Amino acid sequence: MNNGFHSFEEFITHYRSTLRKLFREPQNHKVVSLNRGVPPMLMRDVIQCRPLNVFISRDHGGYGGDVSQCLSMLEASSYESLPLSLMMGINGALFIQPVTRYANESVASGILPRFANEQAMGGLMITEPGYGSDALHMQTSYKVHGDGYQLEGTKHWAGLTGWADYWLLTARQKKKDGSLARDIDFFIHDSRNPGVEVEEYFDNLGLYMLPYGRNRINTHIPESFRLQPPSTGIKLMLDMLHRSRLQFPGMAMGFLHRIADDTLAHVTSRNVGGKSLFHYDQVKERIVRIQSWFTSCAAMCRYTSEKAPISRDLSMEDVPANAIKSVVTDMMQDAAQSFLQLVGAKGYRLDHMAGRGIIDSRPFQIFEGSNDILYQQITESVIKKMKKSGFTSLYAYLKDYELTSKASEYLRSLTDFSVDQTLSQRKQVIMGKMLGYAITMNMVIQLGERGFQKNLVQNTLDVLSADIQKMLSAMNVTAATEPAESIGSDGDWFAFV
């Protein structure tokens, strides 16, 4: 039994109802939309439901850590509040799950029950000033000191800055000559101990509910509080990040479902020119795209639920993880943009779902791997696999590849060509997005085979196919343009009037 609930089903029903009451209450809605932080009473009522228990094993007081239940909780959260869902995702994917997999059991058994019973919170610090996408070259260092390790450095843009009860801190070992080791190690910091000081809080553009900032680290970590990877720390980090990226659809699911519901409600009730917006062809096109992104996300949730149990090492799952994260976050932003376009001026407000959704979903395309970089990495990985397997035809490879075998027949006429293995970076990004869409198509087909709503599945396959065709056309016409190094006086239009 957890927090009075006899089952996960009982919990999730109560959780959805609680969030609806809290976030639909007019005063709460205004406060969380326009102000930073969370009203204490609102946060109390959310945390009293103990949503983080879905990430925690039964041995430590949770529901067992079933991934489908984790995604369902994230979905329920993001239907009412995307920042709340991100808060839960940070705790679960970036702290509880890596601690569950890699912490010393005596340490984990002292920490995880605090999340289950005392509403503790945890986060992750990787990013540093100057070392975001280049995190492998982070400068935070550690040395063996006494009965543990002394960490020093600066971290920034960690969600829950100043709030978390525990942090996973990342650092590289400092050698005797002063240089830093190539590998990265992870350490658990208990915020009841000194050594992680907030130097500045950032005025983040969106996600007002979550505090971000810059932290100065100078702390001692006991030896047992270092995570224990089976091989290297970098492999641990890949397992953790791939697991987190594979769970992005949980946060996206409720967000996209809410946009789909609210958009449909708006266009069926709003009359323009003597008929409802729903009957305009361009409006239908936008609604179909939003519903297609909802369906794609549902397919990703099914995939993650079956392929990413907490017991499985995901360090080698770069292609599905990168595809899911980048594609679904692009879909989130696209859906929010279409929602605002359909709602019009009244949606251009921080306290409206459309305006708020654009601002809050935008950073999802940046953190945990910028989408442009992830798309390029997908292409590099696929080309490497093609070369190793002896394939030159993209269609032949997609047909043979588990992640795209079902989608390949839909794309045969589009992909029956030899892949240039020396593609420019800009074309690698386009191709990576195309491959991400093909992988998504495959997941949608599999979801349809399980009995998911047929018209949504067919519309989604049509939309994805059309977008893939556009991407392949863009690959063929993209020119190798070079930017001007400056805009001089002859770049002033007024001089030519």
Image (tube, helix red, strand yellow):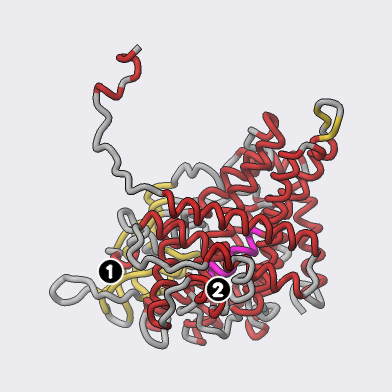
Residue 350, above or below 193: above
Q: Earlier in the sequence, mark 2 or mark 1?
A: 2
> How far across and how far down the image is residue 209, in percent?
59, 49
Q: Nearer the viewer, residue 161 or 466?
A: 466
On the picture, is 484 further left or further right than 431?
Answer: left
Q: Answer yes or no: is residue 102 visible.
A: yes
> How far across and how far down the image is residue 238, in percent?
44, 74
Locate the C terminus by quadrant. top left
Q: Is the magenta region chiefly helix, strand or loop?
A: helix
Which range is magenta? 243-252
Q: Residue at x 64, y 34 (%)?
A: 349
Say if the magenta span includes residue 430.
Answer: no
Q: Residue 96, which numbered label?
A: 2
Q: Residue at x 58, y 68 (%)?
A: 412
Q: Amino acid at mark 2?
A: Ile
Element type at mark 2: helix
- The residue under label 1 is 141
